Image (spheres, helix red, strand yellow):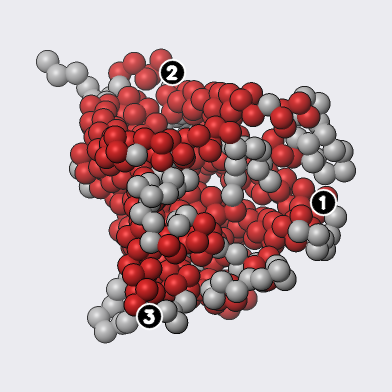
Amino acid sequence: MDAPSRSDEFVRGISEVVGGPMGTHATGGRRRGRFWTATRIVLALVCLTLALHWVQKSPCQDGAWGNGYKQYREMCYTDVLALYYAEGLSDGQVPYADHAVEYPVLTGAFMGLIGLPVHALGVKHPGLNQGEWFYNANVVVLGGLAVASVVVLISLRRKRPWDAALFAASPALLVTATVNWDLLAVGFAMFGVYAWSKRHPVLAGVLLGLGTAAKLWPGFLFIPLLLLGLRGRRFRDAFVASVTGLITWIVVNAPVYLLYRKSWDQFFHLNSVRAIDWGTLWYLGVHFPFVGTLPGFGRLQNDIPAVNFLQYGLFAVCCVLIGLLILTAPRRPRLGQVAFLVVAAFLVFSKVWSQQYVLWLLPMAVLARPRWGAFLAWQAAEVVYFCAFYGELLGASGKGIFPETVFDLAALLRLIMVCVFAGYVVRDILHPERDVVRDTYADDPEGGVLDGAPDAPWIERWRVPVKPDPAKPEAAKPVTAEPATT
């Protein structure tokens, strides 16, 4: 079993405070009668993180925000509570049928499945605070999905259970877990990756399709599956998973589309007309620290169709570049590495980058590059942005506490750190001997049918030759095509 105090430079340095790395003869595996195994410690960590998140959000749970902007001062605002009223759930309105919900179908259904019983209970008990009950019911279910995601991460990395601690103890998870319903899509995405790792492409497609019906981003994971399948001669399995995911998404959406077309259109309409959001690349183009508006960005603020075209166009360009990286890398990249790059590319160029979207990246970052140093630096940037965001909200409400430049710097720092982390992932792909996961596993533990699969014969013409590391002569050895039989 991997010991981070020996394999991770950052943890090894920190461990000097308590006596140094684990010794080579120390017992690191499961011992009979030992309760606090690595798995149980990581699960306890995620439960602690979620409990602290609940405490952090507790000042806002009663919904009595008033005009004092308590939800901003205490940094405890959550869409879950606010939208219980805004989406008509407090009046017993059925999502889509009675009210045009602004979210994809499965998220709207999730809101209704919890919200309508809470409303019915409130009708029977008039003194009940429906919003508080609704929020806490969501905390339980979404928290369960977060714990389940950690279980999946541990299952994917049985030889490296401490990798899951990156997610379990994440500062970003602590401050954003229930700001919205993003953990629903995170759960489905992780279940889908697990099904793929167990070589069940149809089930993986169903689960990722359900994730796409909750938030669109899990559908982006089909991009790396198809590209990796092309290189690893497993395109058929990736295609089956992708088609199954598309069919699943259609089946989930069809009833609402056919019965409540106008309500179904609401999500796509709002995304097409939505203005540039705070903290995005496009926002920074007009509010760049100490500079102001950068050339060409000023006109885009009022030209949303052009921004839509640019954000999707640049994301498509990134996907093409990621595809070239997959085909030319010395070794076939791991699924987690490419999945992180695809989701990160979407967020970097998106016109909307809400604070809780960091949850999309968290599990992918754990799978892509389970090293503590760069991960914690990125997490620190996310927390700084989280705090600055609420300061900006207070400023917009007439209660400013710092200049606009502070928020701009925080947004720029977040953007840079995501790009830096992505850069490290790209470096690990181009120099596979640096990939710590392949120090433990022969190839790709979440790759499923791709794990250990040979390259397609034509890849040799594209592939960049491996530069062997004298210290690890086998670590960078590529998986090549199977020899032809006679």
Residue 362 locus on image (x, y percent):
49, 53
Q: SS for tag 3?
A: loop
Residue at left 32%, top 60%? Answer: 113
For residue 308, what is the image quadrant?
A: top right
Q: How far apart are the two marked residues, 3 and 2, measured between alpha carbons?
A: 68 Å
Residue 92 visible at all: yes
Residue at left 71%, top 48%? Answer: 411
Q: SS for tag 2?
A: loop
Q: Is residue 239 left or right of residue 469?
A: left
**Residue type, label 1:** Glu
Q: SS for tag 1?
A: helix
Mark 1 sits on what residue? 404
Mark 3 sits on what residue? 125
Query: Label 2 neighbourhood size at 10 Å, few (<14), some (14-19), many (20+)?
Result: some
Mark 2 sits on what residue? 462
For residue 226, what is the image quadrant?
A: top left
Q: Is residue 128 left or right of residue 418?
A: left
Judge by depth and name the residue closer to the eye, 431 or 283: 283
Who comes first in sequence, dot 1 or dot 2? 1
**Residue type, label 2:** Trp
Residue 446 visible at all: no
Judge by depth and name the residue closer to the eye, 232 or 392: 392
Q: Pointers 3 and 1 in contact (CB under 8 A)? A: no
Q: How far apart are the two marked residues, 3 and 1, measured between alpha carbons?
A: 46 Å
Q: Is residue 448 left or right of residue 66?
A: left
Residue 129 locus on image (x, y percent):
47, 76
Judge by depth and name the residue closer to the eye, 210 or 437: 210
